[in-house]
Image (spheres, grey):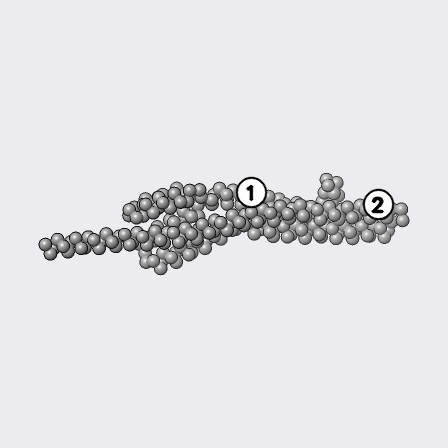
Amino acid sequence: MLDFVKNNFVHVAPILLCAGFAVAIMFERWITLYFRYSMSGRAQFFDKVRQLVLSGRIAEAVTFCDRYPSQPVAKVVKEALLRTQMPEEVIAHGLEITVSELQQQVQSRTPFLATIANVATLLGLFGTILGLIHSFEAIGNASAQQRSALLAAGISTAMNATMMGLAVAIPCMVVFSIFASKTNQINAEIEQSATRMLDIIKQYFYSFSEVEARDQKSDFRRRVA
């Protein structure tokens, strides 16, 4: 294989370049999806936010979200908290924009792995065709005794090109499937977070209305008495 790389570096270099880009993207996506964007203890996080919001401590809830600056879920919650005093339609519209932006960030660069896999496969096939062309040209100009050896060497070179392309493409497709599944999971969590925050804010306004109504009734009774 090393001899093949040395003797056919012009054909191999694009495949190796694809492999380099793929490794860089895999590393970046692994760190981002499994560490930066993945939140453990989401249930406890929302329990804390609900407790703060229903007790009227909105500023404390915003500060609590700031403890998770890289978490998409926390960003959705913070955006909802900052719009708490606005009409429900404004809150929902703001959350839709935030969810869309965050989902684009989560799934960025992951599709490049599928593209690299396809390109690496095509580059391998391209090297295979070039190897066969050179092999047949050499056979046409060689003696009868040399043809079998040249044909075997040309086919070996062609197959090595295909193998290198597939060696890059197969891991890319496997990792792409894994990352795509993780991306879908995080995107679902983002959408669920927006829905849960709308529900928490509605609970907050309902409880606030109930308290205000009780205060008004008590004040009316005092005046009548």
Question: Where, quadrant-wise, is the C terminus in this rendering?
Answer: bottom left
Q: Position of residue 183 (x, y in %)?
A: 51, 49
Residue 34 shown left or right of residue 122 in the figure: left
Residue type, label 1: Phe
Residue 2 shown left or right of residue 38 in the figure: right
For marks 2 and 1 on the same chain, the one whose residue lies earlier in the sequence: 1
Question: Where, quadrant-wise, is the N terminus in this rendering?
Answer: top right
Badge number at residue 149? 2
* Residue lying farthest to the bottom in this orientation: 89
Residue 161 shown left or right of residue 178 in the figure: right
Which residue matches tag 1? 27
Q: Pick whichever, 102 or 170, lies toward us.
A: 170
Q: Which residue is drawn at 80% across and 45% down?
A: 153
Residue 42's place in the image compared with 88, above or below, is above
- Marks counted in the figure total 2
Asked whether residue 65 appears in the rendered view, the answer is no
Q: Residue at x 71, y 45 (%)?
A: 9
Residue type, label 2: Ala
Q: Residue at x 42, y 56 (%)?
A: 97
Q: Where is residue 211 in the image (x, y as percent from the top left)?
A: 23, 52
Q: Which residue is drawn at 43% across and 53% down?
A: 191
Task: Tell me the crowding category of disc 2: few under 14, some 14 to 19, or many 20 or more residues within 10 angstroms, Cα based.
Answer: few
CA–CA distance in space, label 2 to label 1 = 43 Å
Residues marked 2 and 1 touching at CB (< 8 Å): no
Q: Position of residue 6 (x, y in %)?
A: 73, 41
Residue 98's place in the image compared with 167, above or below, is below
Q: Pick whichever, 194 or 121, lies toward us.
A: 194
* Residue lying farthest to the right in this orientation: 144
Q: Where is residue 171 in the image (x, y as percent from the top left)?
A: 62, 46
Asked whether residue 88 appears in the rendered view, the answer is yes
Q: What element carries label 2?
A: helix
Q: Pick whichever, 180 or 134, lies toward us.
A: 180
